[in-house]
Structures are given as structure tokens and as C-alpha cells.
Amino acid sequence: MEMYTATVIVRLKSGVLDPEAETTRRALERLGFEVEALRSADRFEVDLEANSAEAATTQADEMAERLLANPTIHDYEVTVEQHSVPSESQ
């Protein structure tokens, strides 16, 4: 088994009201920043063991589908990175 970090980014689907982003966009404009659009997102990083990157991706997809995202209102993306384990010297 190898160690992986799965990163899951969860965003509201296009057209779904995003009050957090709207409030932040207005605050940025009050500070003088010109903002065309702003979307909020949640980022989850999960360290897990799996036999392959594909297996780690499958696990992270299942986590997103079952808990991290609501497929009715959210889109999500998963990326997986393998950890390099330093060799132990004796």
C-alpha cells in the first residue's frame, strides 16, 4: 500500500446562489478591487493508503459523493498525489 493525499475541491454549481461569495465580492469592490465574478469553494485534503493512484481517486470520489459534496447543488474535483516515503537509515 502506498500513501496518497487526495484533494477534493467542492463548489456550488453554476446558477446556485452563493451568498458567501457575493458578500466577499461586494467587500472587495468596496476596497477598490474590480471583480467580475467570485465563487467560494471548500477544499478537503485527505491522507489515505491505497494500492494505486486510481484506487485513491476512487476512494476520494466516493467520499465526495457520500459526504463532502451534495451532488444536487455541488460540483467537485479530485486530485491525488502520492507521498514519497523517506527511506529509514539504520
Image (tube, rainbow, N blue to C red):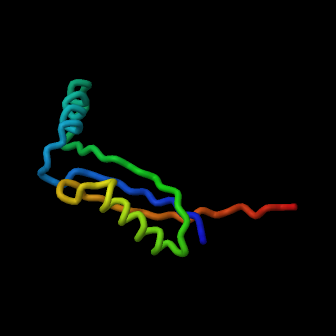
60 versus 52 height, above or below = above
As drawn, the residue found furthest toward the top would be 30
Q: Position of residue 89 (x, y in %)?
A: 84, 61
The quarter of the picture where residue 18 lies is: top left
Which residue of the protein is positioned furthest toward the front in this rendering?
66
For this orientation, the residue located farthest to the right is 90
> Residue 76, located in which quarter of the rendered image?
bottom left
Along the viewing direction, whichever of 71 and 75 lies nearer the viewer = 71
Residue 12 on image: x %, y %: 22, 51
Residue 72 drawn above or below residue 35: below
Quarter assignment of residue 51: bottom right
Residue at image location 14% in from the left, 49% down from the top: 16
In the shown orientation, is residue 7 left or right of residue 33?
right
Asked whether 16 or 62 is in front, the reply is 62
- Residue at (42%, 63%) from the top-left corner? 79
Whether 29 is drawn above or below 15: the answer is above
Q: Is residue 59 left or right of residue 22?
A: right
Residue at x 33% of width, y 61% of height: 77
Q: Nearer the viewer, residue 49 or 76?
A: 49
> Residue 46: x and y, percent?
48, 55
Q: Which residue corresponds to the image point at 24% horizontal and 55% vertical from the top-left? A: 70
Tag count: 0
Quadrant in which the C terminus appears? bottom right
Give the quarter of the figure containing the N terminus. bottom right
Q: Position of residue 55 (x, y in %)?
A: 47, 73
